[in-house]
Amino acid sequence: MFFNKAIDTQKLTFILSLVFCLLFLITVVTFPELFKIKLSEWTASSMGVFGGFYLWLGFLAVVLLLILAFSPIGNKRLGNEKQEYGWFSWIAMLYSTGMGGGLLLRAVQEPVYYFSNPPRISVFSDSEFALQYTFFHWGLTPWAFYGLFGLIISYNLYISKKSILGSAFLGKKFENTIWVSTVDLLIIICTLLGVVASVGLGSRQLLSALIYWTEWDQLASGNAIFIVLLVCFLATFSAFIGVNRGIRVLSNLNIGMASILLLFTWLIGSEWSVIENLFKFLGAYLWEFVPMSLNLKSHQVSNDFLIDWTYFYWAFWLAWAPFTGVFIARISKGRTIRQFIIGVIFVPSFGTFLWFSVFGGNAFWLLESGKAALEDFGSIYSSLFNFLETFPFSTLSNTVASILVFTFLITSVDSAIFVLSMFSDNGKTEPNKRFRLFWGVAIALFAMAVIWIGKDSLLESVSQLMILFALPFSFLFTGMILYFIYQLNFKKTYEQKS
């Protein structure tokens, strides 16, 4: 049996998750065009109305984590046990889970887009401004969303000795109530939609890689389904054998190969002054961080740009925060709050800044020297491969890039499988392997159904639905933040109380 009969809320949450998946697939099959139109309208409306709220939430998340990191609270340790993972493996796992695959998709395409389509007038050069906005969308704020949610879960798990479940912050008074199922269901849905969207985007980039090497048709559903099946099989196996032997090993491999590709591009490219440019771009980003974050005065961009980019990204990072934050909490035992914040916010952000400086800077040089055209870097799926093709040893670099797309995708999926399994097994940090197997199969079936039924159209609907679910989660997240501040400042005996 999958369920302990005494845990009604967990059983209800699990059943409701399955019902949601079935209802979604039935709805899109029965009313595909109407569903797509309405979902697009609802998504745009939610971001248009609550986009400003997302901006403030992201900005305050960064500010709160900075305050906690440099206050006496930062000395507080997340549990009395020793650290389970060293710095390299810890950073590698949270990076692979939270952002690795996206950096391959956007490494060249996004900086080039801002370079050729600046969202507003700026005192900085086109290249500085392009990377300033790339840093903005991929830097401190997304990691603050991940880090703050992960810190709240870590505090509940290691200091308050509660469950890793998101609903644990509700306390015993709400046990076996519909509120527990509601909170956990929302997190499960965000996780499920996020990983399916990730699988969809990743499979498209893998198809672009295969086109580079073979004569496969990019639009063939059978090819995409084969990739999804292979990725989900390997991800399930990784989650099945556990964090230490599966997820950690793959994550270390990811960071090692990504570092090699980064160093190779740096050395073989034409932008040798990367460090100088990095700090120049970083200075521009930090100098204008506050007005950019809140879209103030002369730093205002158009509402269309906000909806298409900033609001979209903030909603996307919020939707990914539950599963990424829970997984980060799972691997962060024994660290102080200060170490946690530095490791989750500053280290990966700096790595991201370096990554975009190398790839973006060289892409700008290729465009200005006439060695590449804008259309070469217009697609998020093929721009990286086109970029590497312009440099020597492109066969070698594109081989590494293709493998990275594959392995980063696996580590996103295996982390999601592990998190969903923990939620299905009453918050156990080492969930039963039958749950890992179940969720691996379920994610594979759901992703394949999405691709088979609707191809890109349905994949877009999944992404929009994930953005839509970011709204109720943002309200939940706000409540959790306020209660977390209350715990830290006004409830010193919280560990002994329910």
Image (cartoon, helix red, strand yellow):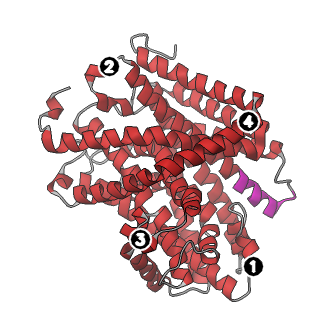
Residue 418: mark in rendering = none
Foreground pick, 287 / 184: 287
Q: Marks 2 and 1, how far apart in space?
A: 59 Å
Q: Which mark is residue 34?
A: 4
- Mark 3 is on which residue type? Lys
Asked if the magenta segment contains residue 209, the reply would be yes
Amino acid bearing label 1: Ala
Label 2 vs label 4, nearer the camera: 4
Residue designated by label 1:
373
Q: Residues within 10 Å of mark 2 (few under 14, many from 20)?
A: some
Q: Nearer the viewer, mark 3 or mark 2?
A: 3
- Residue at horizontal 56 percent and vertical 36 percent from the top: 192
How crowded pointer 4 is (Cα within 10 Å; few <14, some 14-19, many 20+) is rated as few
In percent of width and height, residue 71 lies at 17, 58
**Residue that numbered label 3 is attached to:** 297
Q: Are marks 2 and 4 in contact (CB under 8 Å)?
A: no
At label 4, the amino acid type is Leu
Cα distance between the residues tagged 3 and 2 = 47 Å
User: In this figure, which residue is indicated by the disc labeled 2?
Assistant: 175
Which label sits in the foreground, 1 or 4?
4
Quick one: SS at disc 1?
loop
Labels 1 and 3 touching (C-beta < 8 A): no
